[in-house]
Each structure stands twice: as C-alpha cells, then as structure tokens.
Amino acid sequence: MTPTPDNPWGIRFMAMFHMSNDSGLFRTAIQLTAMGAVREGVKWQDREGTVWVPLYEAKMIHQFDHRWATYEKNGVDLRDVMPEEKTDPGYVPSPRYWVPEKEVEIRLNAKGWNRGWLMGWRDICRSTDERTVIAGVIPRVGVGNNFPIFSAGNGLNVNQLVCLVANLSSLTLDFTARHKVGGTHLNFFIGEQLPILSPGQYSQADIAFIVPRVLELTYTAHDLEPFAVDLGYHGPPFPWDPERRSHLRAELDAYYAKLYGLTRDELRYILDPADVMGPDYPSETFRVLKDKEMKAFGEYRTARLVLAAWDRLERGESLTTVAPNISTAQVFRAAHFPATDMERALCELALGIVQHTPSIRGEQHLQAMILATIPEVMPALLMGKDKDIFLHNRDTFRAFILPEGQRLGWRMILNHLERQGAIVISDRAKQHQLTPGTSFSQYPIRQSAEVIQQLVSYALKACDTLNEWKNAPATIQKKNAHIQRQFEVIRRFFDPEWREAA
C-alpha cells in the first residue's frame, strides 16, 4: 500500500491463520509423526514433500522477545521460556501446531511481504498484563489470528520499520493505548487511532540511536538472522543479558518520550502518577509492571532507569550502552541499498551469474563476483584466446570494476536480490545454494545483458582455473615465478579475512 496523509506508514493488516476457521490446516507433532513426517530443526517434511513450519500464537511472544513462551512436548501445556534457555542463541520455542509452508507463503506473497521476518502485535491485552501494546518481530512462520501481522508501504526502508516497532513498544505510546482499549482486544480500529510517529518525524540522528538498540534487543537467536542482515549486521546473535537489556529499553523509552515532546514531569506521571500527584492520587498507569518489579527488585526499576536515561540525554551525555559492533554507516547503507550506479551494477552482475549457472554454490558465486570486479586478477586465470579477448575488451566492463578501497558487499547484494524475489537462497547453514526466484525476469537491468554475460563467462572460467590450482598445488610449483606471484595475489582475495570483509 502506498503511504497517504491519513496512513503515512502505508500499513496493511493481516490475520494470517484463524485458529478456528483454518484449523483444518494445523498438525501437531504427534500427527506429523503418524504421517511419517521427519523433523528437521523447527520444520517437518512429510512423505509427499510438504514442508510444515511452526504456527506462532500471541502468547508465545512479547516485546523484543520472540521466545517468550513455549509448549511442552505434549503440545498442550504452555510455559515461559527459562532465562538459561534464552542464553542459547540456537534455542527455539516449540509451537502447538505446524502449518504447510506453502500456505504461509501464499498469504505473505499476496500482501507483497518478501522479508525473512514478520512484524505484529498481540490482539489480547488484559488488565493483568504489564503492557497493553505488545508488538515485536518474529521469524517468517505461520501466525495465529491473535497476533495480527502488518506490513508497511513500498517507499519505506528497513530502518523506518525498526523505528515503528520501537515506537509501538514505547511506554509513552502504551500510556495512550491504555486509555483507548476498553476491553481485552487491541483491534485494528484501535491501532489506527494510536498516536504513532510518522516516518518523516525521524531524523538520521534518531535512527542512529534507535536502530542499534532495537537490533540488539531483538536479534538474540539465529532464527532472526534475516532481520539482522536486513539491517546490515552479519555478526552473531547478541547475548541475552537481562541487566543490559533493561538499560537499552530504558534508553529507548526516554528517547521516545523526548520525540513525543514530553517534559520530565510528564514522563514521571506516565511512569507513576503517584510520583507526581502524591500517594493518595487515585489514578494509576503501569501498576502490574510496578508491582512485579517491587517484588523482584525492591524498587520500581523501570521508572528509575528511564528517568536516569532521560537525565543523561538532557545533559547531553553519551550513553554507555550503545550496541557494539554495529556501524551506523553500515545500517544506513543496508537500508538504502542499492543507492549508487556501482551498487546497482553489482546486483545485476550477481543476478547474471545465477542466470548463467542456476543452483550455483555460494562460494563459487562469491569467487566469480570477486574476479569479475577486480580485473587485474583475471588475466592470470584465463587461457589462450579467452585471455586475449578479455584484455582487449577490458574497458567494456568498466561499470563493474570496484573502485580502490570499496568492498564488494556480497551478502548485502544477495540479501537485496532475495528480498526482491529475484533469487532464492537455500541451504544457508552449509553452502548457500542460489537459484532464480519468482521475480527473476522482472528485476530491472540497466547494463547491457550481453556485456554482463560475457563478463560472467570469463569470471566462471577463471573460477574453474582457480579451483584447479587450489586442488593441485604441486602443479603451481612447476610454473614460472611470474605465475606463482600472480597466484599469491589472487589467493589474498580469497582468504577467510577478506571473505568476511566482502
């Protein structure tokens, strides 16, 4: 949906699976086992080749926590995920049901959502809950109707989407929601009335503050790697550290209070009216949260941390809890990629390699990309006429030559092409097999298709030679010193450190 003045986010809502009407699609672990299905991680595959993915329910999810609760092995009893389980980035909650993956994809594709993760919120909001709006990011799985998911307009980048999730999780917004909700359901029409900041209200400084914190709070397990990659982060999941997480959340709450234009006393009132109006004041806001923390910590910790973060922001002090290993420049680049002619050309080149060799392995694809974009290495790996023709036509490939000092951004390229539906990346855990996607032929190509295929052909031939050399080192020793030196230059581009930088 295109953003409009009345709907600046271009929000579209969807209840993916109705827990009653769609129950015919659901299978329990016992039923899947009886069908002869085999479990592979969180998924199952039956004898007919149908893949079954988890069906998440609202009660399994909380703010910045997609591993809030899990079903026991009997598929009936629900329990909270233990803190020690959350410290394992490989741990995933077990659902009650699984649904056919193709049914999930049909529903998401109909909404035009092609990211590897979902956004949504709990429909159920009770007086016994510490928060009213419980929104978050979850993996690309099946979702029950009590956790409606939403997508945003085409013109928005991933950084803005992250800010939307952070906004929905802020105390300031939750305060207003508590005055809107009269029952136990946070319905679509109530969500449409909430005072959510518009995309245009976020400056680059705002995004630089918000995005790294949301990333660290959210990416605590491997199953949300697509979310991290969309933000340009390729490191491991962040540790589940409750103390650190409480500070990060307090900083976000203080920051959003400032974005809403609140004063310190107004923020104090939102946290606890009695703190401003006196102990006999009859109104209350986050009583359940306050009571829970008084029992656990002997104080209303959230209020103390949020106000302390507010004071540091007021004094212009740098906060010490900025998420590590996240480059702000990297985050912005990922959100707006591809933004330059060179980046667009590299995407077209990457697509050309997949077109030439469908089902290509990731390692070979990366090799071909490196060789095609660093032409001084190529001649040492081409033979006979191929070498002569390449040298003669080198200027033809100028649009694909990386400027000195610029990284290839291979993962970012693949991530972009996958989001566009141009390629499919499978077998991520092992060798990353790349195949054409459903929108392969629709991807816009600006460079000459003939030139791309010529360069791809040379690069893949060079890859073959390189792999022959790698597998037959004794042969290399017999070649003259010039070839040996060339090989050392080439090898430098393929060592693990360089690949990580790529």
Image: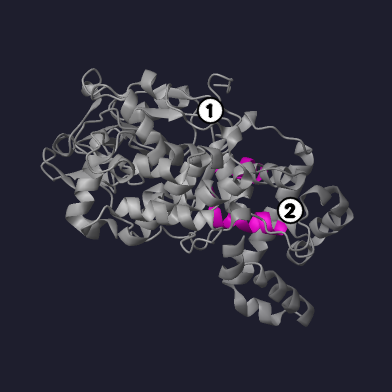
Q: State which region is magenta.
A: 352-371
Q: Quadrant of the N terminus?
A: top right
Can residue 81 be seen in this snapshot? no
- Secondary structure category for the residue under label 2: helix
Magenta portion: prevailing SS class: helix
Mark 2 and mark 1 in contact? Answer it, CB < 8 Å.
no
Q: Which mark is residue 458?
A: 2
Q: Residue visible at 61% across and 33% down?
A: 200
Instruction: Give the foreground label among 2 and 1.
Output: 1
User: Which residue is rendered at x = 58% and y = 70% of the image?
Assistant: 497
- Return the residue at label 1: 9
In the image, is 413 to the left or to the right of 26? right
Q: Answer with left or right where residue 169 lies relative to residue 30.
A: right
Report x, y in % for residue 5: 58, 20
Q: Amino acid at mark 2?
A: Tyr
Work out whether residue 339 or residue 459 is closer to the camera in this orientation and state it.
Answer: 339
Q: Is residue 445 left or right of residue 68?
A: right
